[in-house]
Amino acid sequence: MTLKYIKISLAAVVLFTITSCSNDYLNLDPSTSIPEEQVFSSFESANSALIGAYDQLSGYTFDGLFVPILSDIMGEDVMINSVDNWNWFVAVYQLNVLPNYVFAESPWWLGYKVIADANKIIDNAPAIPDATEEQKNQLLGGAKALRAYVMLKLVEMYAPAYSRNPEALSIMLVNKTLTANDESLPRAPLSAVYEQIEKDLISAINLLEDNDDKGFLDKRGAQAVLARAYLNTEQWEKARNMAVDAYTGLDLVSGTELLSGFNYRNSETIFTIAYTPEDNNTYLSIPSFYYPVSGYSSMRANNNFVDLFSTSDIRGYSFVLEPQIDPNRYLIVKFSHNQLVGNAERISIRASEMYLIEAECEANLNNYAEAQDALYTIQKRANPIARKSTSTGQALIDEILLERRKELFGEGFRWNDIKRTQGRFTREGDHWVKFDIGPEDEDYYRLTFPIPQSELDANSNISESDQNTGY
């Protein structure tokens, strides 16, 4: 699978009917759909379906825009501008998302559409008549990794932290193709969903090889997603091992390359999501919202966050004061366009994140020297005069979490990092909506999205009483 095949993916997307966990949605059958038996009559058509399933991630309501943007403006480091915001993401920034808002509805439904398409590939790939064993493994592994990737995104958004309650209600566990005659599914406990994610990714790791096209999850990509899942569930040794496996053999980009605009894959890319003009994401894309010119250009950096970067940290050059554009707040130039508005790639997983996972896990395992080494790998690349940490215990963990903020801002991590660690959420400085809440406070529920109202209305096994706390 190569990037050029993305151009045909929109045709592949319509190979499957639009499905969800609820019977009402399972009855939809667009006139452009192709009978399932034809899709899986050959490896070529089945592979096109897998390409189409992956391409859906680039949609603006999922990883093309909504998910990474939501995941940062529900933190304290970046914000949507208070003026000229085109009314995009304001309710999210205010932590005031209701069950019928598009920001809660759209990622849910597109996520389950991708899961449904992955399920059909998983269920049918073993019987494709002209596929070799290697090709069947490619289809199965790619689809299982994709299903796990999306489930993990959904569970981070719509369920409470695993560390708070592993048996809390989370999302629907859809691990097979559903038909109109199947009963609607209830919300599954977090533990069951993470078990499925782990099972899918271990299978994918065994089925897949590493490949050069990072537009699809390969073996290394599956290892990285599993490292994230183990991190969320505080399985420190497993998370560390998967993270090391995922980055081994990759070269980190240089300090100066960190300022290249993050608009295309680089040496440390593990998985990337392309959104091009052909995908109709033009203005609804990460560079459009972040880059100061050409596009919506409405993302800003909090002044207190900018102050965390030393003058010798090259990442500090990602922030610019330009009074003619915004006289009050810092612009962000970490993400740029590739000549055309919205023509870029969003690097979804890179090796730097894996080093930081390794550092956090080693610190939690009391392996302080190893944690300091992994942390220093990231720090010295950005700051040539950085000194290796001598901290231990919680102080070292706090340093690592701070480094995650500085290295990964804008890439879609802060929301989940606050929630998974049950950290205090404090907005200060030039934020135009401030918060200071901890897990003991009633308003902490805002860090978990509501289950969409459309799901409650359509699903006979989920009632209002099953809605997340606070909604």
Image (cartoon, rainbow, N blue to C red):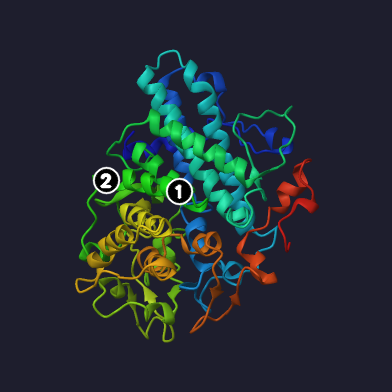
Quadrant of residue 20 in the image?
Answer: top right
Residue picked out by circle 2:
248
Q: Spot the residue most to the front.
A: 366
Determine whether the residue tagged by mark 2 lies in a helix, strand or loop.
loop
Query: In the rendered image of this protein, does residue 468 appear above or below residue 3?
Result: below
Left or right of residue 394: residue 134? left
Q: Which residue lies at the image location 68% right of the left edge and 53% below the top edge?
A: 451
Q: Is residue 29 above or below residue 72?
A: above
- Residue sitting at x 42%, y 35%: 51
The C terminus - image quarter: bottom right
Quadrant containing the N terminus in the rendered view: top left
Q: Secondary structure at mark 1?
A: helix
> Could one spot residue 103 in this view of the protein?
yes
Image x and y of residue 168, in percent: 67, 51
Picture mark count: 2
Residue name at image x 31 percent, y 36 percent: 2
- Front one among 102 and 456: 456
Q: Name, please, the residue furthest toward the top.
A: 129
In the foreground, 335 or 126: 126
> Which amino acid type is shown beneath numbered disc 2?
Thr
Which residue carries the number 1 mark?
58
Q: Determine whether 46 is above or below 445 in the image.
A: above
Instruction: Work out whether 232 lies above or below 144.
Output: below
Q: Position of residue 325 (x, y in %)?
A: 39, 81
Amino acid carrying label 1: it is Ser
Quadrant for residue 183, please give it.
Answer: top right
User: Can residue 294 be seen here?
Assistant: no
Image location (x, y in percent) of residue 453: 73, 53
